[in-house]
Image (cartoon, helix red, strand yellow):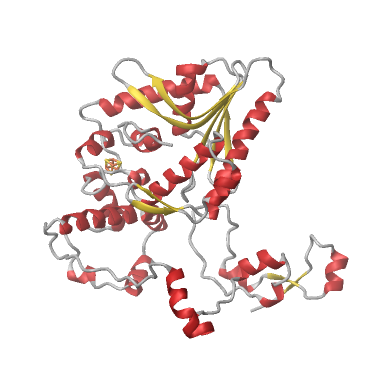
Amino acid sequence: MGNAHSDLSPSAANRWMACPGSVRECRKVPKLPTGESAAEGTVAHALCEQFVEGEIDSLELMGRIGETVTESGHEIEITEEMVDAVIEYADLCKADIAKISGMGRPLPVIAKTEVRVKVDLGENEELWGTADRVTYQKGNTLIVRDFKFGYNVVEVENNPQLAIYAIGVMDQEAGWAFDEVRLAVFQPRARHEDGSDREWVTTPGELKEWKRKLKSHVEDTMADNAPVVAGSHCRWCAAKIGCPAVNGAIAEAAQADFSTAPSPETAKKDVGTLVQEARTWPTRKIANILEWEEPIKAIIEAAKDVAREMLSSGLEVPGFKLVDGRSNRKWIDEDDVVAEFDGVLGTKLWEKKLLSPAKLEKLVGKGKIDHLTFKPEAQKAIARDTDPRRPALTSAQEDFKEVPTADPLVDELMGETQPTKKKIWA
Ligand code: SF4
């Protein structure tokens, strides 16, 4: 888990390495309350620690499905998905020990969870955090494992957060005598073409280079005039609201001035008009605007949070006010409702709802419901070129695409892995 108190948090290393001035800028803004996703991650991490350390067994863990816990002011439900992730993570931790033990070296295998580590960068320069899991045998292999319960894909290769953890472990307790260092990220919810458990296999030599590089980045952040540099890393920056560098970069990408409200003409532009305009834009500009999608969304969400806080405490945000949100009534206790009305209404009290195809398939088995389902045509989505999904067909390819024949005899003659095809013309 990342470190919540360090100005140079390892989990934010991508940001402060790219924008040294962000460390200074972040110190100026009040700390925002923990978001729901972060709170959910904290709950999942706590379960990981308890389960890996044997404080709870699998029955106790599964028994907690459906339980709601309060974390940083959020009500977080322990879901089946969360428990599955914890079990899978624990299996990986066990496999790490087995892998190193199986190498037949004589020294003991050390395995620890939630390890506080600090990179030794000399006086007044501290870089520290908490590694989720560390497994090692001196003189052989060091494995540092990070559990991430979010949906945002994290690349493991050359990941500075993991490099910091590994360097911290070697600086502080394990020494640098290793044949190899394996840095692993387990992301059960994020789709990646290499799967949910991914590794960066590196060496102490390469990490010594990283240590030199990190020292230089840390020194850059400490300079009085450390520059601010905008980029996709701004998405995670606490100082993004009002940051001139990010405002300028977004304004340039969108050709809009965010320091003032939009003009009436801009405000009333509909998507159709904008699409017409966008057709005249150079491709590079379109790509640049797409790159800013996530930072812009994050900035708007952050601005909404701050505006909500200001309006709640009686401050004015010109042109905006707070209104009551919509919510539907909920049962305080469903058992009480049943006790009061089941005898009166009988079956009328209940609604029958058909299971989803996925749920029914789980019950009856794969292939048993194929003849009852269809997939509505979905609109094609834009994704980054690193996305694990196959590229969709272009319109021209769609017009001349190959489709499997419905002739089982032909299919059989061609072999199962070679579906027979015929051309269709639009
Ligand atoms: S918003 Fe971006 S440019 Fe501004 S300080 Fe943060 S990381 Fe740097």
User: Compared with residue 291, is residue 164 higher up or lower down, i.e. above or below?
Assistant: above
- Indicate the position of residue 277 as horizontal and vertical percent values: 33, 68
Residue that appears at 35% across and 74% down: 272
- Indicate the position of residue 147 as horizontal and vertical percent values: 50, 40
Instruction: Judge left or right: residue 62 versus residue 313.
Output: right
User: Compared with residue 48, is residue 310 higher up or lower down, i.e. above or below?
Assistant: below
Instruction: Judge left or right: residue 119 versus residue 137.
Output: left
Residue that appears at 69% across and 17% down: 105
Ligand 1's quadrant: top left
User: Compared with residue 393, is residue 306 higher up or lower down, i.e. above or below?
Assistant: above
- Indicate the position of residue 131 as horizontal and vertical percent values: 46, 31
Residue 191 in sight here: no
Residue 121 in sight here: yes
Instruction: Name the foreground residue: 46 vs 252.
Output: 46
Residue that appears at 60% across and 57% down: 390
Instruction: Judge left or right: residue 71 versus residue 373.
Output: left
Residue that appears at 48% across and 60% down: 382
Q: How many marks?
A: 0
* Quadrant where the C terminus is found in the figure: bottom right
Tell me the quarter of the picture where residue 354 sits: bottom right
